[in-house]
Image (cartoon, rainbow, N blue to C red):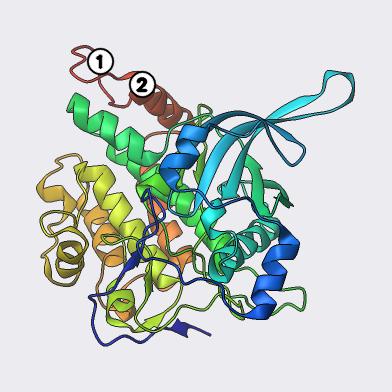
Amino acid sequence: MPTSARTSTPTVPFDDLDADQPKASLPPVTTPAAATATAQASPAPAQSPVAARLAGPPPRVGRYEVLERIGMGGMAEVFRARATGPRGYQKDLIIKRILPQLAAHPDFVQGFVDEAKILGMLYHPNIVGIYDFGEDHGLHYLALEYLDGPTVGSMLMQLRNAKRPLPFGAAAFIAREVCRGLIAVHALQDVRGRPMNVIHRDVTPSNVMTTRAGAVKLLDFGIAKISGSENVTRVGQIKGKAGYLAPEQILGGVVDGRVDLFALGVVLYEMLSLEPLFHGEGGDMGAVYRTLEKPIAPPSTFRADTPLAFDRVVLKALAREPGKRYQTAVDMERDLDAAFVESGLSPADVARVLAEIRSLRPGRPAGSAAAP
């Protein structure tokens, strides 16, 4: 069944996991039971994000050797790490560890638990893989697949700097692969065969990664919604990033998997235009207003290589009324696949396009991101 979250106004804080710090201050744990549980877990002392950066990465997290810190967000820090074993065995991977100052907050811990549960049930070529879920010195962590390519967000920044477009066929391919991952996510069932109604809620360019082999992976299930989870979205709270939220999320309507398809439509539009669709003046609230009111021009009006049929795919994904949008990821994937076939590119062609984008530098005069 769809989930819902009611709010009287869109002027509410956003859970932006890419921010350096949480948007809102967290209430202290004051109940005796919670204090006892916290003491038993023996979490590491709370640190500000700045202090954590200055302290440097830990030498190990659980059984994994930490090689370097890759980044830090509002909820977790991310390390490149290595698992080792007998006779010289080693495997590089990613460690995502909850920030120390959030380790005693049940909502954030439950978000980690939910992410582990979802990834533990998924084995799909378009979803980042999970190897392990554990706790080290009171801090929960995920051991995840190491991916050797940039995010779509980084890729689009390179293209903007170099003033080069992404071929429409490559955009269709990336969106199709993400859609295939969403098909698996939305179809998840529990051990009794009951639908789990999982919603990713954070489909953005920074959460889609490409690899050197040309694969496309959906990342970061940290704010995903699961039916029956203890991590409940409270009244007056929106989970997701402004500019990628569906109108029903902003207005407190019924929320289901179609919000992920709207977000993917925003990402697809951004891949074609190289500019965020709803961002601009006014920060988060400006993005909210534009999500609800901004006229959306068909991609063919600014991209001559975009077929008119593809306009219909993009605009249907971006329909503000959920009933006029794609109803399932299966339906959207079918149209994206047809668009990719029409482009004349193959997956190998797209891999070459992505490799050329990785080599671009701002102002580089030679070459282009066009298909071979």
Image quadrant assignment for residue 372? top left
Direction from residue 7 to residue 278 in the image, left or right: left
Quarter of the view holding residue 316: bottom left
C-alpha span from label 2 to label 1: 8 Å
Q: How many marks?
A: 2
Local packing at callout 1 (Cα closer than 10 Å; few below 14, some 14-19, many 20+) is few
Residue 367 - label: 1
- Which of the two labelled residues, at mark 2 and mark 1, occupies the earlier sequence position? 2
The three-letter code of the residue at mark 1 reads Gly
Residue nearest the observer in this picture, 272 or 276: 276
**Dots 2, 1 in contact, CB < 8 A:** yes
Residue drawn at the location 27% of the way across and 58% of the way down: 314
**In the image, is 222 to the left or to the right of 294?**
right
Residue identified by numbered label 2: 356
Label 2 environment density (alpha carbons within 10 Å; few <14, some 14–19, many ≥20): some
Position of 362 compared to 40: left or right? left
Q: Which mark is residue 102?
A: none
In the image, residue 77 above or below residue 24: above
Residue shown at the point (65%, 50%) measured from the top left: 141
- Is residue 210 shown to the viewer in this render? no
The residue under the point 31% across, 60% down is 244
x then y, percent, for residue 17? 42, 55
* Residue 174 visible here: yes
Percent across and percent down for residue 348 are 48, 28
Q: Position of residue 355 (x, y in %)?
A: 41, 23
- Which residue of the protein is positioned furthest toward the right in this rendering? 86
Q: Secondary structure at mark 1?
A: loop
* Amino acid type shown at disc 2: Glu
Task: Tell me which residue sits at (33%, 60%) in the image.
Answer: 241
Rendering coords of residue 15 (x, y %): 38, 63
